[in-house]
Amino acid sequence: MPLPKKDRLAEYVAKAAEAVQREVNSAPEHRQAAQLARSVAARLDDPQGAPALPALGRRVLMLSPRDWAYHSTVDGVIASALRLRGADVAFVTCGGGLEVCDRANVTEAPPMPCRTCTKYVDNTADAFGFERFPIRAGWAGVDDGEWPELDTLSSSELVDVTYDGIPVGRLMQIPSKWFLLASRSDWDPLSPQMTRRF
C-alpha cells in the first residue's frame, strides 16, 4: 500500500472528517438535504409559495438502492421538485442482506457493504424527509425455493433464462459483469456462479 502524500494531508483530514460525519448521520450533503426539505415544507405550507402547477396527486417512487452519494442526492433533489409540484414521493431502497450485489466488486467483496450502504441511503432519504420502502421487506417468506436447473447452465446458457416471461438472464448480465470487473461473462470462471447469485 502506498504511503500517504504529505502535500495531501488536508484532503485526507477532510475526507476522514466527512466519513465520521456520515457514520453519525451528519454528512455535509445530508445537512444540505435537510435544509432543502425544510424549505420545501415551508413553501408548501405557505399559500404564497404554493406551486404554480396544479397538484398532480400522483405517487412517485424513486428507486435509489445504492449509496452512491451523487445519485442519492440527485434523486432527493428531483423528488423534492416533484413534491413541490404536488406529487406524493417515496424512496424504494435495497434494504441490504443480499448474497451479492453490484455495489461492490470481486476485489472488495464478500462481505457485501450492506451496513454502510443501507445506512447511507436511508439517511439520505430521511434527510430529504421522504418515506422509504426497502425492497428486501417484500422478500420475507416469498422465496420460491431452489432453482436447481441453473446449477448446470454455462454462462452463455444463463443469458437465455426467463422467469414468468421476464428475461432475468439478460438482466443479470450487467450486475454480474460489473461485480466481476469483466466485459465478457465467458472469460471469468466465476461468472456462472455470480450470475446465479444475482
Image (cartoon, rainbow, N blue to C red):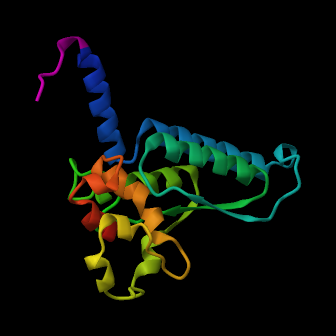
Q: Foreground residue, 5 or 53?
A: 5
Residue 70 lies within the magenta run: no
Drawn side of residue 158 relative to residue 43, left or right: left
Q: Which residue does the image show at 80% across and 64% down from the upper left?
A: 57
Residue range of the region highlighted in magenta in the rendering: 1-7
Q: Can the viewer see residue 160?
A: yes
Residue 2: percent from the left, percent from the top? Answer: 12, 24
Residue 180: percent from the left, percent from the top? Answer: 28, 52
Residue at the far top: name it.
7
Drawn side of residue 3 relative to residue 113, left or right: left
To which quarter of the image does residue 22 belong?
top left
Q: Foreground residue, 124 or 69?
A: 69
Residue 46: percent from the left, percent from the top? Answer: 81, 48
Q: Which residue does the image show at 83% across and 48% down from the upper left?
A: 50
Q: Can the viewer see residue 103?
A: no
To which quarter of the image does residue 9 belong?
top left
Q: Which residue does the image show at 51% across and 44% down from the upper left?
A: 71
Quarter of the image with the N terminus is top left
Quarter of the image with the C terminus is bottom left
Residue 5 lies within the magenta run: yes
Residue 16: percent from the left, percent from the top? Answer: 27, 32
Tag count in the figure? 0
Drawn side of residue 189 relative to residue 59, left or right: left
Q: Main secondary structure of the magenta part?
A: loop
Query: Is residue 153 placed above or below 176 in the rendered structure?
Result: below
Query: Is residue 48 placed above or below 159 in the rendered structure?
Result: above
Drawn side of residue 20 relative to residue 74, left or right: left
